[in-house]
Amino acid sequence: MAKKNNRKYIFVVGGVMSSVGKGVTAASIGKILQSRGCKVANLKADMYVNIDAGTIRPAEHGEVFVGEDGVEADQDLGNYERFTNQTSTREDYITTGQIFAEVIRRERNLEYGGEDVEVYPDIPKEIIRRIEACQKKNKSEVTIIEYGGTVGEYQLLPFLEATRMMKAKNPKDVFVVLVSYLPAPPLIGEQKSKPTQRAINDLHSMGLNPDFVICRSELPATLDIKKTISNVCSLPIERIISAPDVYSIYDVPVNFEKENLGGTLLQTMGLSVRSRDLKEWTAFAKKIKNIKKGVKIGIVGKYFNFKSCKDTYISVIEAINHATWDMGHKPEIIWLDSEKYEHDKNKLSLLDKLDGIIVPGGFGKRGTEGMILVADYARRKKIPYLGLCFGMQILTIAYARSMLRLDKANSTELAPHTRDPVIATMADQVEKIKNKNYGATMRLGAYPCKLKSGSVAANAYMKNKISERHRHRYEINNSYVEALERAGLVFSGTSPDGKLMEIAELPKSVHPFYLGSQFHPEFKSRPLSPHPLFSAFIKACIGKKK
């Protein structure tokens, strides 16, 4: 464990506008310092008053990332895990809702000794306590804290005040990295630093000065821009880092190290400068740029109309990328709105042009009949199919309707009074749903699973015992398992006690790849270590293409 006086904290904050890459920047800093021998931790602090991300619509806020202990968190924790290969838990995630709830709980329990409790200093103090708890849990030498939103926003003030308090107490241990956008209006034809200067002034108003400025832009930051920003915040020019658009997010650590960000960070923090070791990562980033052969993957969903599909299904997309790149192909992802097939079944024939189909997780009835049609079509036409959580339930409903002739087979989520509930509410969820107790009450986090020897799943994992992360309220109804198995469906993965069906598949002799998992394998895929199920799926897709 790092000595108390050697614990460093890096705060990553945004300027000008959001969604310019704070999460990837924080993850990249973690990767770079890790490659130089530092023990790091990444923490995300979100400004919303929700206790966690679990009750926020994916179309509103993006994917809900599930940690090993079941925390439902912001999608940036997924980037942290993919870059640093570390496991995220609830200590690595803060929201305004958590902070206020804990302060109020302590006040109700007289833990403030009868003193009046105020936004200042009690809210910032609780934020600091959470940050230090993250450091303690991870035993990190450097803890990287990413703040959601941008400086100047009202809701960020308590968090910036917490940073100022930590900086005032230990000025040599607390550092601020500002990620700011450099616009380049086409009619002007040059980058402009005034918005970034405004963001720096906002930081100054909170008693903070950036120690590094990451300049996000389409093209590399010019030397003149770097000099201007360097003068505004009185920083050496080597701490003004260019961050242009790149081929993939995995290029970001490599680009940062071209400007020696890791060495400058260590020197600035007063830590010994250590040699970098990004060889494997750099080779990977270089490899994927030169891949020519493509494979067409259709993602069938319904969260396409409000926010970027990339945010809604980010872990699924990255898991596809990892497995496809590993096999020397590049993915061509095609977004398929499931509702279109409900209105016109003839459009199903367009699926023949795909090399594989994925039905990811989701909730609610809208668009599900289209998904069922797609799952059945993929089975009949021998198109590789991977169902994730809800996608496994869709697979099972489709199979029951076609092979058991149960025309009304459905899920109690979608049709509470269905005659044939092949997907049923989990026993421990019935009262929770009845009482509208929705927040953090699903089956969440990592659970063990045993695999059937010789199955597609067991051959993919190359072992018979696994652990995967879950997020669901509904499951395969065991009353239908025997009939489904007689009809040819194989439940190749179950909970250790055999009561929960974890994986459903068809044998290779029947279908090149037709498999659904009740868990979310995408959460454990890594750039240098693709998930086995995605690898097996992509291998089948390439086989179909050939």
Image: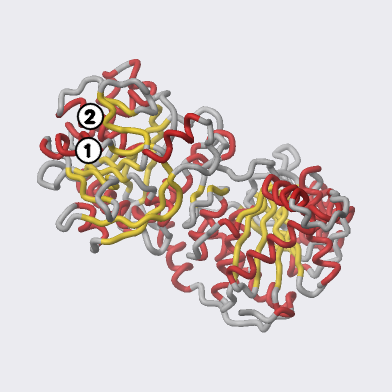
N-terminal-most mark, 1 or 2: 2
Residue beneath disc 2: 377
Drawn side of residue 364 relative to residue 359, left or right: right
* Residue 188 visible in the displayed image: yes
Drawn side of residue 257 relative to residue 267, left or right: left
Question: Alpha-carbon neighbours of circle 1 within 10 Å: few (<14), some, or many (≥20)?
Answer: many
> Which kind of residue does numbered mark 2 sit on?
Tyr
Residues 364 and 183: in front is 364
The location of residue 512, given as percent across then percent down, is: 17, 45
CB under 8 Å between discs 1 and 2: yes
Residues 182 and 210: in front is 210
The location of residue 477, given as percent across then percent down, is: 27, 36
Q: Residue furthest top?
A: 343
Question: Alpha-carbon neighbours of circle 2 within 10 Å: few (<14), some, or many (≥20)?
Answer: some
What SS does tag 1 mark? loop
Q: Is residue 279 above or below residue 201?
A: below
Residue at 81% over, 57% down: 112
How far apart marks 1 and 2 lie (CA) works out to 8 Å
Residue beneath disc 1: 383
What SS does tag 2 mark? helix
Residue at 64% over, 48% down: 20
The location of residue 147, given as percent across then percent down, is: 69, 53
Q: Is residue 50 above or below residue 171?
A: above
* Residue 180 visible in the displayed image: no
Among the 4 quarters of the image, the one containing residue 272: bottom right
